């Protein structure tokens, strides 16, 4: 798990990687809003309405996850790996984080599948390969959720068996935990205010 983290996440932890990541999120969101603005009416096909609705919920859900990690790294010098994040989901605050992250995963996946379908359906070969792509579109998030559940249960079991391991994964304690929660909530409120104001 941590070995994969070094390969998959390391490029995005650098300054150029963060710049590319944040810029791509911003450009993607602005292009979606521009496409909506260009329309003469709001009579959308169902798939486009779902894609737009899900796309507008993504920043609200993502800001809590990304904000918590970015605030912890930038202000408090904490290093985050899969183990620490899974500890937060499964041990520290499972009543909040676990459902939040699984919902985010599903919304991101459905939004992406709807976007890919809208882009690919005009291609001549799409009708031939769609019977293969549809089961994959269902199988990938199911396997991802099963992987998160398996890893989370392993971390929870290890934390219950070994208090020293649990202490090494604890992210925030005391006053720092309260500060982080207030900042995350403020970020989420600012994001939802800017979307509703638009």
Image (tube, helix red, strand yellow):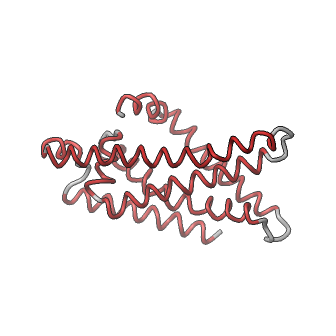
Q: Residue at x 51, y 52 (%)?
A: 105
Residue 47, position as x, y percentages in the image: 73, 61
Position of residue 83 measured from the top left corner of the image (x, y, whole percent): 31, 41
Up-down: is 160 above or below 95? Answer: above
Q: Nearer the viewer, residue 6 or 77?
A: 6
| Camera-side residue of 113 and 26 | 113
In the image, what residue occupies the spot 31% across and 59% down?
A: 94
Q: Position of residue 44 (x, y in %)?
A: 78, 67
Please tell me whether residue 10 is drawn above or below residue 107 in the rendered image: above
Is 102 on the left-hand or right-hand side of 31? left
What is the tally of numbered marks visible in this picture? 0
Horizontal and vertical percent position of residue 23 = 60, 43
- Residue 185 occupies which quadrant of the picture? bottom left
Seen at 53% across and 55% down, the residue is: 106
Quarter of the figure with the C terminus? bottom right
Task: Give the quadrant of the N terminus.
Answer: top left
Q: What residue is drawn where x is 62% and y is 58%?
A: 55
Tell whether 87 sits left or right of 7: left
Residue 92 image-quadrant placement: bottom left
In this rendering, would 164 be left or right of 120? left
**Does residue 100 appear left or right of residue 25 in this picture?**
left
């Amino acid at each position: 798990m941590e070995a994969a983290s070094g390969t998959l996440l390391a490029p995005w932890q650098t300054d150029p990687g963060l710049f590319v990541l944040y810029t791509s999120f911003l450009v993607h969101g602005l292009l979606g809003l521009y496409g909506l603005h260009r329309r003469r009416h709001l009579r959308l096909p169902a798939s486009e309405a779902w894609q737009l609705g899900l796309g507008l919920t993504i920043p609200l859900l993502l800001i809590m996850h990304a904000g918590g990690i970015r605030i912890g790294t930038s202000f408090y010098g904490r290093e985050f790996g899969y183990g620490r994040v899974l500890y937060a989901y499964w041990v520290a605050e499972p009543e909040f984080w676990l459902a939040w992250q699984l919902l985010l995963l599903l919304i991101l996946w459905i939004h992406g599948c709807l976007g890919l379908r809208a882009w690919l359906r005009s291609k001549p070969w799409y009708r031939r390969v769609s019977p293969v792509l549809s089961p994959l579109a269902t199988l990938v998030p199911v396997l991802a959720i099963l992987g998160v559940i398996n890893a989370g249960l392993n971390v929870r079991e290890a934390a219950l068996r070994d208090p020293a391991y649990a202490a090494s994964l604890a992210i925030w304690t005391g006053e720092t935990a309260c500060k982080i929660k207030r900042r995350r909530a403020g970020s989420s409120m600012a994001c939802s205010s800017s979307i509703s104001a638009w």
